[in-house]
Image: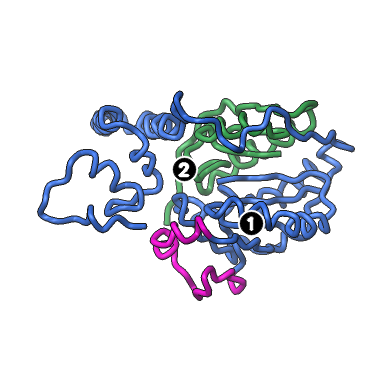
Amino acid sequence: MTHADDARSDDPLSFEEFRRSFYYGSRNDLNFKFFSNVDDDAAADLLQNLLALVGDAYDTGDIRPLINAAYLAQIAGYSPAPSASRSPHTYDTGPFTPTAMPVAGSTVGLITSSGHFVGGDDPEPFGVKGMTQDEAMDRIDEFLRETPELSLIPSDTSSDQLLVRHGGYDITSVVRDPNVAFPIDRLAEEKASGRIGAVTSTFFSFPGATAQGRLRRELPGWLDRIGEEEADVILLVPV
Amino acid sequence: MVVMVKAFEHVAKRMTLPRTLITRNPMGRPLGAAGDTDRQIEVLDAAFDLMDRADEPGTIVELETPFRPGTYRS
């Protein structure tokens, strides 16, 4: 999905083209792909603010205002416009099952859309062996039309055996530490400390950038498999 | 029980999910920065507290602790 027409060249880019290049373009940056959703004035204001905060940090050494500014801009960038049409995934009521026991006595399962899998058990999307993250980003359009595959991850897997690939978000943090989105070690610690009763033998993950209709068709089978774990509580971490 | 970042809170609201914990974290880091074990545990504890306390669908609680930059070193 890289936009070849904004490839770096001697031709000057408009600010809009520059802004859009962060969304799977020549300056692709999944932390800031929301630039494509904001208008030129908002994007310019953000950049000006970020640069000012960098200047301030020269003296203070405090980067938290810088991070906070980027964080707030991300929220604004993903907020639906007031004129946006009602999403087909809008529900006026929702399911709710009361817990049968406190979490401290419960078996906890985990499902994430972070795209994690165990090394050696690569789902090999599109039949590609060892697809890299860059390749996944380049093929994001195909992923968004594809049936997702659910990866099964034994809950006693060492976190250094986990791999991740997902063309829809910046995976820098989860590569460094899977627990950022797939808290396998933290759940083991919560079990050891007695905060939870137990964990299921298998956790699950899939790349959430996928065809939502195809995902819905896969769900009955997925739920049957997940149900085999007999979790009392399931932690869902969408990314 | 869903843990998600603030940027997508509007999704949790419109879908009326059973129980949602919102974290004030950047996208891609729902439980916190890489290596920030204490914050990751804090998020899980808050999620489990919500699991114990929520009594109706559409319950959304925001963890007010701001994102803490990590100290990761390669």
Answer above or below: position of A33 versus A185: above
Mark 2 lies on a secondary structure that is loop
B5 lies left or right of B49: left
Residue B21 appears in the rendering: no
Q: Which chain is blue?
A: A
Q: Gap in Å between the C-alphas at discs 1 and 2? A: 24 Å
User: In x, y percent, where is residue A28?
Assistant: 33, 51
A215 lies left or right of A133: right
Q: Nearer the viewer, residue A141 or B6?
A: A141
Q: Chain of mark 2?
A: B
- Give the amino acid at mark 1: Ser
Which residue is label 1 attached to?
A205
**Quadrant of the image occupied by residue B65:** top right
Which residue is label 2 attached to?
B70
**A177 drawn magenta:** no
Q: Residue at x 28, y 48 (%)?
A: A21
User: In x, y percent, where is residue A165?
Assistant: 50, 60
Quarter of the image that includes the N terminus of chain A: bottom left
Q: Chain of mark 1?
A: A
User: In x, y percent, where is residue B44?
Assistant: 67, 39
User: In x, y percent, where is residue A26?
Assistant: 27, 54
Mark 1 lies on a secondary structure that is strand
In this view, the residue farthest toward the left is A10
Colour for chain B in the figure: green
Q: Residue at x 26, y 33 (%)?
A: A47
- Give the amino acid at mark 2: Gly
- Asked if the residues shown at circle 1 and circle 2 are in contact, with their CB atoms under 8 angstroms apart, the answer is no
Question: Magenta residues?
Answer: A119-145
